Image (cartoon, helix red, strand yellow):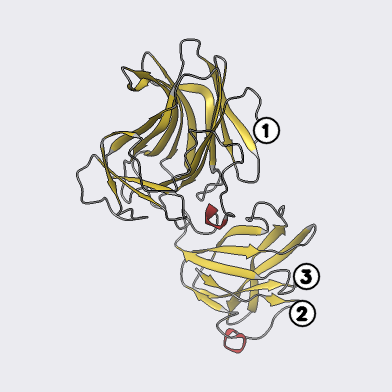
Amino acid sequence: MSTIQPIFGGPFPTDDPATLGGTIAQMVTTSAIEVMLNLADISGQVKVFVLGWDADAGWEPLATLDCTERERNPPLAGRNRFDVAVPTPRYICLYAPDLTAELLPTAAVVPYAGGAVPLNTFWTPWTLPPIVPPAQANLMDQEFASGDLSAWELTGTFVHGGVNRGGAANVAPPSTVLYSIGERPSWLFLQAANGATGWLSLPYGSAPTNWYMTALMSFDTNSFAISANDTGVQYFMAQSSGGLLDFGNSVSIAAFTDASGFMTFKMYKHVGGPQIAVPGAEYTCPEVACHINKLVIHKIGTTFRAFLGTTGGAFMLLGETVEPALAPDRFGFVLGNASVPNMVVGCDYIRHIEAAVVNE
């Protein structure tokens, strides 16, 4: 990623790239670019133009970017992201006739070769404000503020450290899941080896009648062609059997990439038989860099609902199912990976509220 200085106000630019200089006119040799524009407080909609240099015709419009100011909370407010095709190698610049440097303090460009955009570019949740535990926390809330997972029941081989975003399969045995805590500072990174599956679960206690369970998540996306779905994580409520995880009786939200690299979320139920996708409970992000970063499972009596959410407070009902025979008393994740590079899943917290009505 490289920052670029837009041309603000004034007439349509006529100076050649050499005159404008490298901070304004940048050479692009790839077939596409990703443009990020970080707007300050404005109202309404403004336009920014991506211009391409032609030695004969001068600057020509490649794309018109319609920028709309977002709400000021969350901090992703004002960030606008666009994909722009570049037909042939050429210099590009940004022309913002209605803006100033104060209104558009940051602009950046990422060249890429078309198809899926690069891994975790602009739309990642790393710029969130400090995550503060609620004033009335549940004793089973997990903030992942330390590297200690001793209370968790682990199925499979878990190794602390070595998490490698976008890296090749780790050198440990295929059943290995890598994790790292304290990078955000309270962030759990999980990366399964190619073909690996691992479970983490934690007993909640007695099965609540009403149980709202929310997790703040991050999902890496592979930006390359894959031949099979690349499973990232299943976030679940489950029963215990003999004091251990009984995943055969569970409700979960699965997050994985489809064959095109886009994140898909599905709700599953697993009640005394094979795992079944809840009919209609599926959502695929329209962009490779997925905007979903909250997963919620809400048990209300015998009804289980799955929600997808954003840090801005928007939620979508993914699906629901009624399961009178299911009484979950533990929670956790299933980690898996089918392709290389390995996906990385992050979880900042898991929080619980025992209530039928919750306004998060």
Q: Which is more foreground, mark 2 or mark 3? A: 3
Q: Residue furthest top?
A: 324
Residue 51 image-quadrant placement: bottom right
Q: Nearer the viewer, residue 39 or 50?
A: 39
Residue, disc 3:
98
Q: Is residue 171 left or right of residue 261?
A: left
Determine the secondary structure under disc 3.
Answer: loop
Q: Nearer the viewer, residue 99 or 93?
A: 99
Q: In this view of the protein, can residue 360 be seen by the observer?
A: yes
Residue at the (42%, 23%) spot, across then down: 238
Marks 2/3: CA distance? 11 Å
Q: Amino acid at mark 3?
A: Asp
Determine the secondary structure under disc 1.
Answer: loop
Residue at the (63%, 22%) spot, across then down: 356
Looking at the picture, does residue 352 appear above or below residue 112? above
Percent coordinates x, y for residue 307 in the rendering = 57, 32
Q: Residue furthest right?
A: 43
Residue at the (67%, 33%) spot, across then down: 359
Percent coordinates x, y for residue 150 in the rendering = 32, 38
- The earlier-in-sequence mark between 2 and 1 is 2
Residue, disc 2:
11
Determine the secondary structure under disc 2.
Answer: loop
| Contact between labelled residues 3 and 1, with CB atoms less than 8 Å apart | no
Residue at the (59%, 63%) spot, across then down: 36
Q: Amino acid at mark 1?
A: Asn
Mark 1 Cα within 10 Å, few/some/many (few <14, many 20+)?
few
Residue, disc 1:
359
| Contact between labelled residues 3 and 2, with CB atoms less than 8 Å apart | no
Q: Amino acid at mark 2?
A: Pro
Q: In this view of the protein, can residue 220 be seen by the observer?
A: no
